[in-house]
Image (spheres, grey):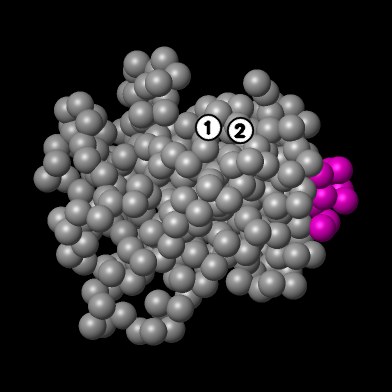
């Protein structure tokens, strides 16, 4: 399958993994609507919704930048309507917008807790929910959420409970919608990286200096492309890991995704096990 003339609506996407997924789809000639707040340059976060839109169009797609907050019901409803009107429908939802704060529970302000859950969990639910009538009209409808596998082993739950709740909430949306929408032929899946990905969030929030211990956003873009080009009636309810998806698709050389370091020096992301020569002691925290 191809994403030619397919319409994607994505929360976030002005930089990092979201932008990489959008640009990869644009290479097929996809239409991409971006819902993001980043209309002005940020001193520590390169890129805006407009630079991402330009990159999409330069790659061969059509872009619709929509500036607003995914927590705002009226904005999301209007953005979905504008996307459908501009491109004639909606085929794919990518829930990419996410807030992160790794503060331990006793020190986490409730304002930050609410921010993470409103953007991550509520925003995912709201955008997905609002798009369902349009997805029902698509021949190959997908909802893809960037969230982790629902791991309940206590070993994964020793720190940053607030962030865990917010990310697992996104995954619960995947689990619930995959069941609710299965008969409609609408796929709902999650995708998560096995390793750190070199994004502004990792550099500025999670672990400064981790660039060489990270893969590039291209691995998530390529994995997302593989998922989104699968038949939606045959691919739903999964919690995919990026390199597993690509290995299944026949990729054997992952060195192209290295960001200057070595495979054995890659830092593992949250809630995932190592694969191959990766060092289990190297992990985001």
Residue 211 in the image: state x and y as whole percent. 32, 45
Residue topped by disc 2: 232
Q: Is residue 261 magenta?
A: no
User: Which residue lies at the image location 26% right of the left edge and 68% below the top edge?
Assistant: 160
Quadrant for the C terminus, please: bottom left
Residue at image position (37%, 49%) is 148
Q: Which mark is residue 235?
A: 1
Label 1 to label 2: alpha-carbon separation: 5 Å
Residue occupying the point 58% across, 51% down = 180
Q: Quadrant of residue 183?
A: top right
Q: Which residues are magenta?
A: 81-89
Query: In the visual, does 49 lie left or right of 17?
Result: right
Q: Please indicate whether residue 47 sits to the left or right of residue 60 in the image.
A: left
Residue 33 vs 258, above or below: the answer is: below
Q: Position of residue 207 (x, y in %)?
A: 28, 57
Q: Nearer the viewer, residue 176 or 83?
A: 176
Left or right of 73? Residue 197 is left
Numbered label attached to residue 33: none
Residue 99: where, in percent of width, then height? 45, 65
């Amino acid at each position: 399958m191809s994403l030619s003339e397919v319409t994607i609506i994505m929360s976030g996407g002005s930089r990092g993994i979201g932008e990489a997924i959008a640009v990869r789809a644009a290479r097929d000639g996809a239409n991409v609507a971006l819902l993001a707040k980043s209309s002005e340059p940020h001193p520590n976060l390169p890129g805006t919704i407009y630079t991402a839109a330009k990159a999409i169009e330069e790659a061969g797609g059509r872009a619709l930048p929509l500036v607003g907050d995914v927590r705002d019901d009226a904005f999301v409803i209007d953005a979905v309507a504008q996307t459908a009107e501009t491109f004639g429908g909606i085929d794919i939802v990518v829930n990419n917008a996410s807030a992160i704060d790794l503060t331990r529970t006793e020190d986490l302000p409730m304002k930050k807790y609410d921010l993470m859950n409103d953007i991550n969990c509520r925003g995912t639910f709201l955008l997905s929910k609002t798009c369902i009538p349009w997805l029902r009209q698509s021949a190959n409808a997908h909802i893809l959420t960037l969230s982790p596998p629902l791991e309940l082993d206590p070993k994964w739950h020793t720190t940053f409970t607030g962030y865990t709740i917010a990310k697992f909430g996104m995954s619960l949306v995947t689990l619930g919608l995959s069941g609710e929408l299965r008969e409609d032929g609408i796929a709902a899946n999650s995708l998560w990286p096995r390793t750190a990905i070199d994004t502004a969030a990792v550099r500025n929030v999670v672990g400064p200096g981790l660039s060489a211990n990270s893969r590039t956003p291209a691995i998530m873009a390529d994995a997302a492309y593989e998922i989104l080009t699968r038949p939606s009636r045959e691919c739903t309810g999964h919690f995919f890991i990026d390199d597993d998806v690509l290995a299944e698709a026949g990729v054997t050389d992952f060195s192209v995704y290295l960001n200057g370091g070595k495979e054995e020096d890659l830092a593992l992301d949250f809630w995932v096990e190592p694969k191959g020569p990766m060092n289990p002691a190297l992990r985001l925290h």
